Amino acid sequence: MNRCAQLSLAATVAAMFAALAPTAASAQTTASDGQALQRNFPQQALRGTIVFFAPPAIALNGTNTQMAPSYRVHGTDNLLVMSARLSGLKATVDYTTDLQGMVREVWILTPAEAAKTWPTTAAQAAAWTFDAIAQTWTKP
């Protein structure tokens, strides 16, 4: 066996072990000390109450509407939730909309996140001050 073949075999074996090795979860919701990690929501996100029907139908703040074609729903663990698990669910959420006003991205909130003050309208978001690090809004 020549040297090139040995190096190629060694590289292949190393790549296999690297692919099979466990990796840290990127959506980890608790730190090693047991404290909950903070999720970061975009400044343009608004707070609302949502009821999921058969996709893409939803009721947002009591108004029937639809999700955008490219919608994503993040669970309380920040992992994506498939639409089959959402039907019939009612939750307090932070959400963003696309250019047509359809709901594009949704974060289902934990009780601690829902307890924080967050704007429910674009007018409130324009008048309030947002601290992106602390993920808090301050009313004027």
Image (cartoon, grey):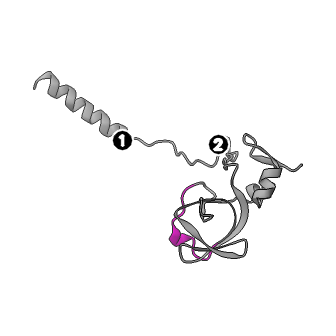
Pointer 1 residue? 19
Residue 31: which numbered mark, if any? Answer: 2
Q: How many marks?
A: 2
Whole-angstrom CA distance, mark 1 to mark 2, is: 25 Å
Specify the quadrant of the image occupied by residue 68.
bottom right
The stretch of residues the image draws in magenta is 79-89
Measuring 27% from the left and 35% from the top, which residue is drawn there? 13
Amino acid type, label 2:
Ala
Q: Is residue 24 left or right of residue 115?
A: left
One can see residue 57 in this view: yes
Which mark identifies residue 66? none
At numbered mark 1, what does the secondary structure look like: helix, strand or loop? helix
Examine the structure image and report whether residue 130 is included in the region drawn in magenta. no
Name the element at disc 2.
loop
In this rendering, position of residue 14 left or right of residue 87? left
What amino acid is found at the position of numbered circle 1 in the picture?
Ala
Image quadrant in which you'd find residue 114: bottom right
Q: Position of residue 126 (x, y in %)?
A: 78, 51
In the displayed orientation, state which residue is furthest to the right. 140
Residue at 66% from the left image edge and 47% from the top image edge:
40
- Counting residues from the N terminus, which is met first, the one under dot 1 or under dot 2? 1
Quarter assignment of residue 74: bottom right
Residue at the extreme front of the image, as rendered: 100
